[in-house]
Image: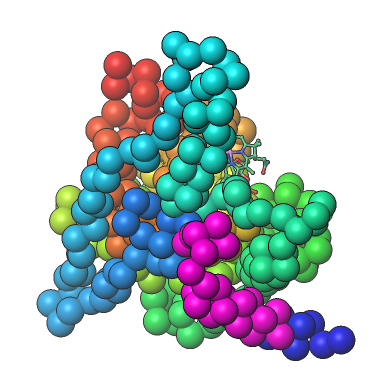
Amino acid sequence: MNEQLVEQITKMVVEKLQTAKQGQSSPSDREMPVKLFSDRPAGQSVETKSADRVPDGKVTFHNTAEKNVAAPAVKTVNTNDSCKVARKEQPAEHVNLEELRKKTPARVGVGRAGSRPKTNAWLQFRLDHAAAVDAVYGEVPDDLLQQLNLFQVHSKVKDKEEYIRRPDLGRRLSDDSKAIVKEKCKHAPTVQIVASNGLSAKAIEENLKDVFLSLQQSLANLNIEVGTPFYIDKGRVALMDEIGEMLQPDVVVMLIGERPGLVSAESLSAYLCYKPRIGTIEADRMVISNIHKGGIPPVEAGAYLGTVIQKVLKYEASGVSLVKKEG
Ligand code: B12
């Protein structure tokens, strides 16, 4: 059967089941919306404003303050009573599973039908799995790169299958791409920003614009010079080492799609390193991960990244070396 049709039908069934569930009143049957954060239903994103350039070139940031909500009330067994009595008075159901489920997007307490998952849970799982596969195999729209004025180069990888099987090839630019980067990019800037689809094109599609614009704004506010940014198709994190060798920036920031999970398939990470070179050890890199609407809001991440870069420049170190120098 047509894969898209399967996905569409699955989605419709899930939606139908969810609508049916909403009509139910029995607390044991009611599905709890899992929340990524205390005041946010799971799977739903926080309402965030997009970062956009206003006419004077500034980026508007939004307020993302989280409400502090008290920890869930978990009733414990009274240890003064005998075991038998305590169990009778405080059965396991007293642990408020619904409250606990609100605290994690993980698939816990979803129930079962005999030895199998419930239809709703199983279909939701398949839907999330399909979204993860789509994120890995998807493509980043060209107009997004044009909008952000990013030119595109390629790693040594030929296609997605090779990308998955040969991470080493994703850590090097193709020969043509090396020539383009050398020709187009400013040499020895303070900060070099690069973006790559990595393991999730969806992450780039959903978050790159906001992170990129707010990062640029943040660096401009801090008077930190930025080189010529570009986009790498099918890159890996350690490709920043080759960029470090070629362009000699003080800091490389790579905005890259994370390996999708079954909660979010659109999460972006910002990896950075002070003067990366081929052979740089992993401990000298750092990462700000989980950038998406349900995690660190992209605009906020961009602004925060600027301050991290400022610190990296001040201490002339990143990762574990930075922690050691900072004391
Ligand atoms: C896959 C993965 C790994 C794999 C990487 C294997 C590989 N060669 O690809 C392994 C199991 C080795 C790993 C190890 C660690 N990881 Co890890 N990892 C991930 C995961 C699930 C996906 C990363 C991804 O998609 N990267 C993008 C792709 C395109 O990158 P890549 O080039 O293929 O692979 C590179 C990166 O994955 C990077 N990397 C992976 N983890 C980490 C962690 C840090 C701190 C750094 C700087 C780099 C890094 O190393 C790879 C090789 O260069 C993320 C979860 C997430 N949501 O992002 C956690 C995650 C990034 N890892 C994390 C951590 C804490 C670690 C460890 C420090 C765990 C430990 N205590 O040892 C180590 C550090 C490894 C390092 N490079 O320094 C945290 C980082 C938290 C944070 N914000 O600081 C994350 C976010 C998981 C989490 N939620 O806690 N990790």
Determine the residue positioned at 77% across, 68% down.
Answer: 159
Residue located farthest toward the left when viewing the structure as drawn = 56
User: Looking at the picture, does residue 86 appear above or below residue 128?
Assistant: above
Q: Quadrant of the C terminus?
A: top left
Stretch in magenta: 9-33
Q: x, y (%) of residue 242?
A: 58, 47
Name the residue at 37% across, 18% down.
324
Q: Is residue 235 above or below residue 7?
A: above
Q: Nearer the viewer, residue 180 or 159?
A: 159
Determine whether 291 is above or below 141 in the image: above
Q: Is residue 22 magenta?
A: yes
Q: Is residue 232 left or right of residue 161?
A: left
For the point 67% across and 68% down, which residue is it? Answer: 120
- Residue 63, image quadrant: bottom left
Is 318 displayed left or right of 233 in the figure? left
Residue 127 is a magenta residue: no
Horizontal side, residue 155 vs residue 20: left or right:
right
Where the N terminus falls, by quadrant?
Answer: bottom right
Nearer-the-camera pick, 85 or 179: 85
Task: Residue 318: tell me if it is visible.
Answer: yes
Kindly indicate the quadrant of the structure image that contains residue 257: bottom right
